[in-house]
Amino acid sequence: MDDTTVRAAGCVLWRRSPRDGGLEICLVHRPRYGDWSHPKGKLKRGEDALAGALREVAEETGQRAEPGAELPTLRYPVAGRPKEVRYWAAEAAGGRFVPGDEVDRVLWLSPGAARERLTQPRDRDLVDALTRSLEHP
């Protein structure tokens, strides 16, 4: 990774459904891009990736999160620059969503529904990685 790489981090935020105890994954809607994704964002200069991932979850979803297993890192180009996004599984530990300019909606969905709703196909692999990490801790 060189100094032109955009460094970012995020989480696949999950909880047990208050209705039936099934696994639910939180997706965020970003009006600027009109997409559904996992909470993530650019790291501040010198910021630890996990700390940045938890900060982004709090900023975008209002949730405190308990980090778990590190998930696959995604790499892809954005505006002609390489981007690297590190992800962790993170269990929601309470909080309240407040809509804002960056994220205007959140949804808690089953893994299958989350895979279908995600805009970028590359983000779907993270749903599968999360379910595997929870089945085999």
Image (cartoon, rainbow, N blue to C red):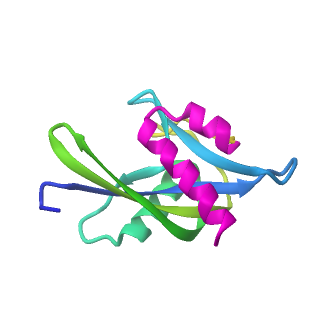
Q: Position of residue 107 (x, y in %)?
A: 64, 39
Q: Nearer the viewer, residue 126 or 63?
A: 126
78 in magenta: no
Q: Position of residue 133 (x, y in %)?
A: 60, 64
Q: How many marks?
A: 0
Height in image: 71 above or below 124?
Answer: below
Q: Position of residue 38 (x, y in %)?
A: 50, 47
111 in magenta: yes
Q: Nearer the viewer, residue 34 or 12?
A: 12
Residue shown at the point (35%, 72%) measured from the top left: 48
Q: Going by the image, does 40 lie left or right of 44?
A: right
Q: Quadrant of the N terminus?
A: bottom left
Residue shown at the point (55%, 62%) measured from the top left: 89
| Residue farthest top in this picture | 34
| Residue farthest right in this picture | 20
Q: Position of residue 60 (x, y in %)?
A: 51, 49
Most prominent secondary structure in the magenta stretch? helix
Residue shown at the point (16%, 45%) measured from the top left: 81
Q: Nearer the viewer, residue 101 or 42?
A: 42
Residue 106 visible in the displayed image: no
Height in image: 31 above or below 43?
Answer: above
Q: Quadrant of the C terminus?
A: bottom right
Which segment did they paint magenta? 110-137
Height in image: 3 above or below 107?
Answer: below
Residue 67 visible in the displayed image: yes
Q: Nearer the viewer, residue 75 or 3?
A: 75
| Residue farthest left in this picture | 3
